[in-house]
Amino acid sequence: MVARYRMYARLRWVGVACFIVAIPIPGLVLVSIVDGRLPWTWMFPAIGCLGLSLGTFGTANDTALHALRSAAAAGLPADAAAELRHEEQVRPARLAQVHHSPKASFIIPLLAALLIAHVVRQLIHVWSG
């Protein structure tokens, strides 16, 4: 279970990276819309980039915390035990209700990366031609 926790804890960083990349996308799409290079409907996937990147982090975080909570009975390494203690102090009710979504923790990052790549590709296309 500790190995599972570590894997999903690393997947949280994929969500952080996706979010950092996705932050400027709605603004760039808005500029492209105002300039007449894209139709207004491109705002939907632009905002979806932000939403899916946040979903990437959230799903991996919930799955990591669930694995951490499940592994607590067998004993935890110091870093994992420190995160569990922190969660118990800050959000005990949420920790008790957290659930795991292992498949979604891999599918959502893939969808987020594909959507971000698609929108960025479109932005590059409309601004380079």
Image: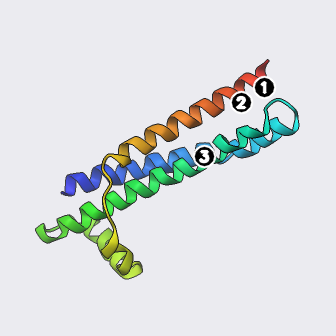
The residues bearing labels 1 and 3 have C-alpha atoms spaced at a distance of 21 Å
Circle 2/circle 1 CB separation < 8 Å: yes
Secondary structure under tag 3 reads: helix
Instruction: Please tell me which residue is depicted at 76% across the width and 25% down the height of the picture.
Output: 126
Residue 86 pos. (x, y %): 36, 75
The residues bearing labels 2 and 3 have C-alpha atoms spaced at a distance of 15 Å
Q: In screen coordinates, is 37 left or right of 66?
A: right
Circle 2 residues within 10 Å: few <14, some 14–19, many ≥20: some
Instruction: Please tell me which residue is depicted at 64% across the width and 26% down the height of the picture.
Output: 121
Q: Which mark is residue 127?
A: 1
Q: In screen coordinates, is 34 left or right of 98?
A: right
In front: 2, or 37? Answer: 37
Q: Which mark is residue 85?
A: none
Q: Work out whether mark 1 precedes mark 3 in sequence or the reverse, and give the earlier one.
A: 3
Disc 3 residue type?
A: Gly
Circle 2/circle 3 CB separation < 8 Å: no
Circle 3 residues within 10 Å: few <14, some 14–19, many ≥20: some
Disc 1 residue type?
A: Trp
Q: Nearer the viewer, mark 2 or mark 3?
A: 3
The residues bearing labels 2 and 1 have C-alpha atoms spaced at a distance of 6 Å
Residue 21 pos. (x, y %): 60, 42
Q: Which residue is the site of mark 2? A: 123
Q: Is residue 32 above or below residue 83?
A: above
Q: In screen coordinates, is 69 left or right of 121?
A: left
Residue 129 pos. (x, y %): 79, 18
Q: Quadrant of residue 5?
A: bottom left
Instruction: Please tell me which residue is depicted at 52% across the width and 54% down the height of the picture.
Output: 54
Q: Residue furthest front?
A: 41
Q: Which residue is the site of mark 3? A: 48
